[in-house]
Amino acid sequence: MSTLLEVSGVSVSFDGFKAINNLSFRIGPAEMRAIIGPNGAGKTTFMDIITGKTKPDEGRVVWGEKSVSLLKMNEAQIARAGVGRKFQRPTVFEDQSVFDNLLMALKNERSPWQVLTFKPKFKDLGKVEELASEIGLSDELHRKSGELSHGQKQWLEIGMLLAQEPRLLLVDEPAAGMTLAEREHTTDILVEAAKTRAVVVVEHDMEFVRRLNCKVTVLHEGSVLAEGSLDHVTQNQDVIDVYLGR
Amino acid sequence: MRHFFHVLLALVLLALPAQLMAGPVQDILQNYRAVIEKSSRKTIEPAIDALANSGLPQAQKVLETWQAKDMWQRKSDGFFFEAKKVNAKTYALIDFDTGETVGEVAKDEIDQLKPNSGIRAVIATALVQFQLSDPDPARRSDALTAIERNAAADHLEPLRKSIATEADPAVLARKQRLERLLTIRFDPEIEARIAAIESFGGDLGVDLRATLNPLLATRRIVVAGKPGAELNIARTLRPGSDELPRDAAYAMLVDARLSTPRISASDKRAALAANIVDGKVAGIPVAQLNSDEARATAYAALAAGGKAAPTVTEAQFEAALAAHSFVDVYAEPSKAVTDAASDAMDAIQMRVGLNQALDLGLDALSLASIYFLAAIGLAITFGVMGVINMAHGEFIMMGAYTGYVVQQIIPDYTLSIIVAIPMAFAVTFAAGVAMERLVIRWLYNRPLETLLATFGISIALQQVAKNIFGTQARPLTSPAWLDGAWVMNDVVSISYIRIAIFVLALIFLGFFLFLMKKTRLGLETRAVTQNPRMASSMGINKDRVNMLTFGLGSGIAGIAGVAIGLFAKVTSELGSDYIVQSFMTVVVGGVGNIWGTLAGAAMIGFLQKGIEWLNPSNTLAAQTYMIIFIIIFIQFRPRGIIALKGRAAGD
Amino acid sequence: MKNTFLMRNPSVLVFLGLLALFTLGVTLMSEATGAALISTSFVKTLGKTLCLCLIAIAMDLVWGYCGILSLGHFAFFGLGGYMVGMWLMYERTRLIVEKSLANTEIPPTPQEVVDAIGTQIFGVVGSSEFPLVWAFADSLTLQLALVLIIPGLLALVFGWLAFRSRVTGVYLSILTQAMTLALSLYLFQNDSGLRGNNGLSGLQNLPGLGSVPQSVISMWFFWASALALGLGYVLAAWVVSGKFGSVIRGIRDDEQRVRFLGYSVEGYKLFIFVLTAMIAGIAGALYYPQAGIINPAEIAPIASIYLAVWVAIGGRGRLYGAVIGAAFVSLVSTWFTGGQAPSIPLGFYTINWVDWWQVVLGLSFVLVTLFAPKGIGGLFDLAQGIRAPRRHGQPLGPGQGALQEKEAQE
């Protein structure tokens, strides 16, 4: 299996506290992966490193077929290379309409000049409509996103993520604050997405992870504790200790 | 000997009854009666020398009396006395030998001796040896001061003589130093002078430099051919070098009448204008004379026709320069002496340079203290609380004006400063609390709005101050004991007021550390700034803590205002002069860390002084370059010198 | 394209219509071209106000839309003024010098002319040589190009340094203020090459047009200022209307999120910063010939803060708000500080507005910030029944420049 992203031997510390400790991780181009771990395990920092928000003290982060290092790129370049990220708290542009939010996220040229002279083509409008119906916001297209409910904002952010057409999706607790039905819909979208691209889901909810039906990586104290199917890792003694004991 | 004297005296008494009371001093005076009466600078010296070298205790008194034009001659017998005016017509005569009054005479019976200034100067020189050996150390000291001020070659001998008998160590040291200085200037022996020069080492005294500088003074001369060996040449200059541009060299030749002047552009123009004939100059139409080439052609034609002075061609110019030497020569003829002096001067300059660096360091330190003082209040309100207060400078101004008002009420400067400091704190604390309550409280987490709102307050306060106190600067006078300076040597000195500000800055630093680390308020402040919600839920009254902390920061600004007002003029713009630098200090140092503020103030203070030192004429440029430096510095350390790291530092 | 853009933004049409009406009204009332109801100096004041409105639009773009509270845009404004002032002063001095030299018996050489101009211009700072910065002063075309290039270049270099190191929020504000202070201190020096604190003067006289009365020249500049304002408004409206506007408003509210969408935030900020610096330069180039004199005090940091005050009072984040704010505050300030406002006798004290206007302005600014973040522009929302959403005090994004709850429109 070819590799889309390979993280090897990465460490990072904040004022002496090792948030990530010699962590290695790899994922293929069309694969679903769930990451679980207790609070402070380094899940968010791990995502920060991949997206360029935090620079690791040591280690390598290699991307794509050409094996380029992500460490030399800034956040925007990494995003353009095809890494999309959804935050724990929904972050959408609340002063702007759903349409504007989606249009901004839509995969297109990103340089100031091209954006300045950009006129949405028929194709782009169609794509926005399509995404809006997929995330159930067709009727809200011209409302300001700040007026949406919490769940709707989650959806909008997932829609924006899909609009970017990334090759790797990093999704932080997508199901928080959603009803059961919405969760199922989210699962469907993610499973569908994972057919053509890599998806990394950070989640606490074991039921949600089970429904994803994918390989699971358990993080603890900044490094990988166990990896395998959900059943496999939940029977691992170390994992049980970390989650239940001590 | 004494016998002989008595016999002689008896003989004299017998021979000249009128000289019955004559003593040894009077004898000397009578011996030189003719020259004294003649009173001429050219012939007087033997008389003065005889007096000075007589060894008589009265000699000094005689010379002083003479110098003060109080010596009179009795017409009847030609004796000399000190005369004191009794009334307009009558004078009391005092005998020099005994010091007793011998009687009163009418004014027309005596003649006043009126030594001219030349004679008085000779007397003064003769007096030096007496004054240098005067029993009173203060008078000896005065004599030394007089010599230092106006030294002459004649002083050297008496000075040397007086050293042997000097008992007072302080005066002795001065005498020895002065003797060496005079040796350098006046001793005829070259070896002695060189030895004296070398004896000083790298002494920093201004007097030594004042002695050496005239030795090293040069004048620039031009000589035909090679300079002669009789000249003590400091250096030979090449025309066309930086020190001596070719035109300047040629001008020297012209001044020395060694060459004819070149025709300047304006002279050429004037000559052309004077020779316009029918709209043409030498056949060239005037309208075409708008280029240098055309003018040169026309002028050459004029010169050839004898209507203008001939120009000096480039070749002549070159030849004239080549035929002469341009040298700087010392006025001092001895090369050995100038070499020694030059070496000594180099050593001195080296040490002066080091000391100037030290002085600059002290200057920078005090500037840093001032910035620190101005910024420390900000370190609390901006650094710890994160509130951008553009009116901070106006709090400094309010403190300074409080000091001014207190001085109007309490005239004693010491007492008024002691009262002004708590008053200034109280006033600005109250202003700070009011501002926090009314404005800032509503704008936490909205730093940009805070910036603009506090700016509004800032311009309002400035204008109010202008309306109350007027636009002219108000003085805030420091107490007398803060005047003056601590002088380490002739180069390094620091005024007491700057020391006081430095000490005040240290006190504030200590106070800040104590407040933040050791007090309940400090703990609560840190808690509230780090996590206001958590702090509230632990029972900390967030509003109260914010109010007090902000008031405290403002109050410190008020005290800083008193200190700054002591050396800067108090105007309504006092605060705005410091506000940008204060913010820079906090930002450069690293927000939220008092050591950072200290480092920032030190860096900005030293940097500014350093740049001023490189370009001393221009403090504006120094500030410009410093700000540019800071902008670039922030590129490399965006979070300041002492940066907080980690996720808590803020995303 | 233009058509559809204007269709989509009817407020632009309204603004242009009002501006045209205003220009027409002033034209008809002026001394030179109309009924002489308003004085030439008032025409100049109005023309200058239009220039201030233009720079307010630039400020609104950079602060209201992009969230960068720049306290340095008056530096760009001043630089634009200096660039035009250099040509005006050089050319006018050249004409005077050539006229006086024409009377001499021998015609001057070109070097003599240049020297005489230099003595005329730099005599006040004890120099007669032309500094390097005057290299293009003899060419109107080049100096006009420099009106754009110099502010643009300064903004480019400064912005690149500042944005690259991710300096944001108040830190950026303080840094821009420092830049302005550095520039004004530099210009205050006599050897800065721009006549130190004397500045450039006599700019109201157009070279070669000595016979044209000031009343006519003032109208020309008034029309030029109105045209520049109109074009600037359209340009700004066009920039913020499309996806570009979306992106920069996104940067204002949450720049990190924009970054994760793959937009190079620094590039956008730099683009806006440079663009607005150039607009400010143009505004300054039109302003100072009407003011007649420019000196470094104009560039002092406080001027730039006033600019922010105008925009805030007018209502940031809406272009017409900036225009209203700048026009309103600067005209009212002129009225009060010009001594026209009647004093208020209180018996024990007489409130003299020349002395107290500044206080009122400062305090009213505090009140606007606290109670009416939408500024005067908020009145339009009120009229249209647009209210702010209820967000329990939450701003619209984590950025320091993000819109406040009360500034948002439902």
Image: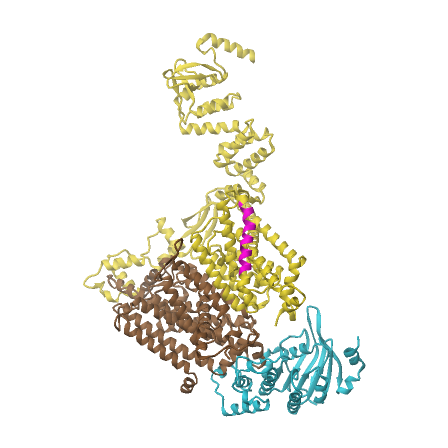
Chain colours: A cyan, B yellow, C brown
Q: Which residues are magenta?
A: B416-434
- Relative to the observer, which residue lies in front, B248 or B102? B102
Res. B120 image quadrant: top left
Find residue C121 and report its horizontal and vertical position in percent.
35, 61
* Outermost residue to the front: C347
Quadrant where the N terminus of chain C is found in the figure? bottom left
Could you tell me if residue B350 is visible in this image? no
Left or right: where A241 falls relative to B251? right
Pick whichever, A212 or C134, lies toward us: A212
Residue A193 relative to residue C9: left or right? right
Looking at the picture, how far across and down is residue B521, in whole percent? 64, 59
Q: Is residue B360 above or below residue A66?
A: above
Q: Is residue B424 magenta?
A: yes
Residue shown at 70% from the left, 80% from the top: A8
Left/right placement of residue C377 relative to residue A185 reads left
Along the line of sight, the residue nearer the viewer: C385 or C113: C385
Q: Is residue A5 magenta?
A: no
Farthest residue to the right: give it. A237
Asked whether the viewer can see residue B142, the reply is: yes
Query: Most prominent secondary structure in the magenta stretch?
Result: helix
